[in-house]
């Protein structure tokens, strides 16, 4: 029986708005769970709190209510059991690929000797950058930089890999290939993954389950289990089953996007009247 790895219980997040003196409710009563080894994607309209949620899960933000549990223990700050992969590769330009990958180990006080180099090379090879370990970031394509970013996160051996739209800046063809590569890497690394995306077919293709966030304040609107066998190739995106998932997911997202647009128009009207 699968074990719960990450759990959100009644999570709430408010932000103070200095300009108006008011409060913005970003998340309200978010309840969800991620099983060990599961690949879960989160989708929802812009501004629904997806990134806020994963920043809390990573310990970068403290919620105003509720909690997130990792292996039953409340998350109260950043930890070695989690690693974040951001939209931008955030590589240090004066460091080579292998030095960038080893940076996380250095930050955790594990040194930069032969053992650490060997560990880094293991994940450089896993993400398909073998032969580029001595190259600098400016010598790499966008996709290769994100591979390096992913290798750096995997090298510190996190329990949970948190990914915030890591392929958003890539061109369409590279993005497709990186999705395929990510599934290969995930299958080999055996990590629990929480992945944020705005792209509906990406969410379906990668996931065991897709969690749909409602418009602000963000909360879980629905959970869609993806019963497409693994391993998955890119051709599965053209299958009838995949397109049915896509249609179902888009219908729910469209409804939430319209709510967001209507709410934004109300705010604009109030500001204009004021």
Image (cartoon, rainbow, N blue to C red):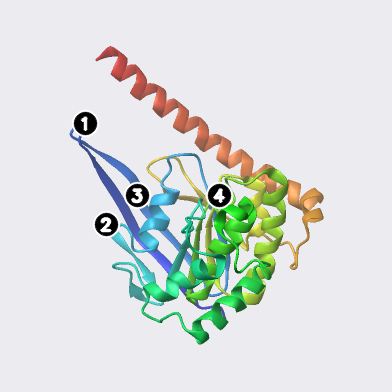
The 10 Å Cα crowd at callout 4, few under 14, some 14 to 19, many 20 or more, is: many
- Which residue is labeled 2 in the image? 65
Q: Are the two marked residues, 4 and 1, in contact with CB atoms closer than 8 angstroms? A: no
Element assignment for label 3 = strand
- Which residue is labeled 4 in the image? 197
Distance of label 2 from label 4 (alpha carbons): 25 Å
Q: Is label 3 or label 4 in front?
A: 4
Q: Are the two marked residues, 3 and 1, in contact with CB atoms closer than 8 angstroms? A: no
Choose the circle earlier in sequence order: 2 or 1: 1
Q: Is label 3 or label 1 in front?
A: 1
Choose the circle earlier in sequence order: 3 or 2: 3
Q: Which of 248 and 122 is in front in this view?
A: 122
Q: Are the two marked residues, 2 and 4, in contact with CB atoms closer than 8 angstroms? A: no
Q: Residue 19 carries which label?
A: 1
Choose the circle earlier in sequence order: 4 or 1: 1
Q: Position of residue 185 (x, y in %)?
A: 65, 69
- Which residue is labeled 3 in the image? 28
Q: Is label 2 or label 1 in front?
A: 1
Q: Can residue 21 be seen in this view?
A: yes
């Amino acid at each position: 029986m699968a074990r719960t790895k990450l759990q959100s219980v009644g999570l709430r997040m408010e932000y103070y708005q200095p300009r108006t003196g008011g409060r913005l409710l970003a998340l309200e009563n978010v309840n969800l769970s991620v099983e060990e080894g599961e690949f879960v994607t989160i989708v929802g309209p812009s501004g629904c709190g997806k990134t806020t949620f994963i920043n809390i899960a990573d310990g970068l933000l403290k919620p105003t209510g509720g909690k997130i549990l990792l292996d039953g223990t409340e998350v109260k700050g950043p930890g070695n059991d989690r690693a974040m992969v951001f939209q931008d590769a955030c590589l240090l330009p004066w460091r080579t690929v292998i030095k960038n990958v080893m940076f996380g180990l250095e930050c955790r006080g594990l040194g930069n000797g032969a053992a650490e180099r060997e560990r880094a090379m293991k994940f450089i090879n896993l993400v398909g950058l073998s032969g580029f370990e001595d190259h600098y970031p400016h010598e790499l394509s966008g996709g290769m930089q994100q591979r390096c970013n992913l290798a750096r996160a995997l090298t510190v051996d996190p329990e949970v890999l948190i990914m915030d739209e890591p392929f958003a800046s890539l061109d369409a063809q590279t993005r497709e290939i990186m999705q395929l590569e990510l599934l290969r890497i995930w299958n080999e690394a055996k990590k629990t993954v929480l992945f944020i995306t705005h792209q509906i077919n990406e969410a379906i293709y990668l996931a065991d389950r897709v969690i749909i966030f409602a418009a602000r304040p963000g909360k879980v609107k629905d959970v869609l289990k993806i019963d497409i066998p693994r391993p998955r190739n890119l051709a599965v995106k053209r299958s009838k089953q995949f397109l049915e998932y896509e249609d179902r997911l888009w219908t729910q997202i469209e409804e939430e996007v319209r709510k967001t647009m209507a709410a934004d128009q109300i705010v604009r009207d109030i500001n204009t009247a004021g």
